[in-house]
Image (spheres, helix red, strand yellow):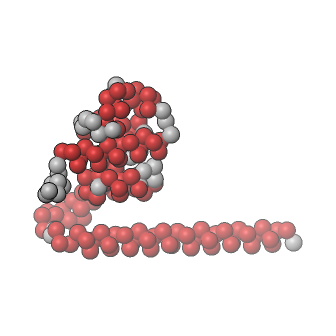
Amino acid sequence: MAEEPEYAEDRIRAGLAHLLAAAVEASGRARCEIATDANIHKDALRRILQAERSATLGEALRILEASRAAPRAHLLLFLVCGDDQAIDWLQSDLAKFFEEFSTEFPRALHRSLGENVGDVKPRWAKGTANRVSRMLSDHISELQRKDEFLGNFFAGERESSDV
């Protein structure tokens, strides 16, 4: 038997249901509360979470929002990386960062490149992603060094005042 195509309806429905069910579970909220906040009948929510019916785009966004997840980030992660990556980042600052980054990046490209934005090549994406990740890593390391320095500085100041 041939493998199911990547964009087959059953595969998409199952993956999205997996993500939404994980978001609902991670939220710690009752399903009836999520259904109410998402403006979805509780039976419809049950069928969506069990992949018995497909969620509309609006329903998926509202379920994620009612589950206190970053809705756009998780749907984008689901579309680009699959349900496992989206689930790994549930309820995390990394998901919120990704949502903000995904919103701001096209604007930043346009501001920086102007009319040259059309010259960007798809083959540059991987290298650019690695470069941005390294810059972010360096930034985090620098902040940690500063925090450690300030902690040591204030600890030494307290020791001096105790003498």
Taking depth in this image into account, of 71 and 15 the one nearest to the observer is 15
Quadrant of the frame with the N terminus: bottom left
Can you see residue 103?
A: no
Query: In the shown orientation, is residue 56 left or right of residue 50?
Result: left
Quadrant of the frame with the C terminus: bottom right
Query: In the shown orientation, is residue 35 left or right of residue 53?
Result: right
Q: Residue at x 39, y 52 (%)?
A: 87
Q: From the top left corner, tell me how far across and down residue 76 is, in percent.
A: 28, 51
Taking depth in this image into account, of 103 and 86 the one nearest to the observer is 86
Q: Is residue 85 above or below residue 45?
A: below
Q: Is residue 40 above or below residue 102?
A: above
Number of numbered discs on residues: 0
Q: Is residue 26 above or below residue 153?
A: above
Q: Residue at x 42, y 50 (%)?
A: 90
Q: Residue at x 43, y 71 (%)?
A: 137
Q: Quadrant of residue 155?
A: bottom right
Query: In the shown orientation, is residue 91 left or right of residue 162?
Result: left
View extreme (right): residue? 163
Taking depth in this image into account, of 97 and 151 the one nearest to the observer is 97
Q: From the top left corner, tell me how far across and down residue 130 is, in percent.
A: 32, 72
Q: Is residue 125 above or below residue 38?
A: below
Q: Quadrant of residue 159?
A: bottom right
Query: In the shown orientation, is residue 92 left or right of residue 15?
Result: right
Q: From the top left corner, tell me how far across and down residue 84 is, in percent.
A: 35, 56
Taking depth in this image into account, of 43 and 32 the one nearest to the observer is 43
Can you see residue 21?
A: yes
Q: Residue at x 17, y 49 (%)?
A: 8
Q: From the top left corner, tell me how far across and down residue 81 is, in percent.
A: 28, 58
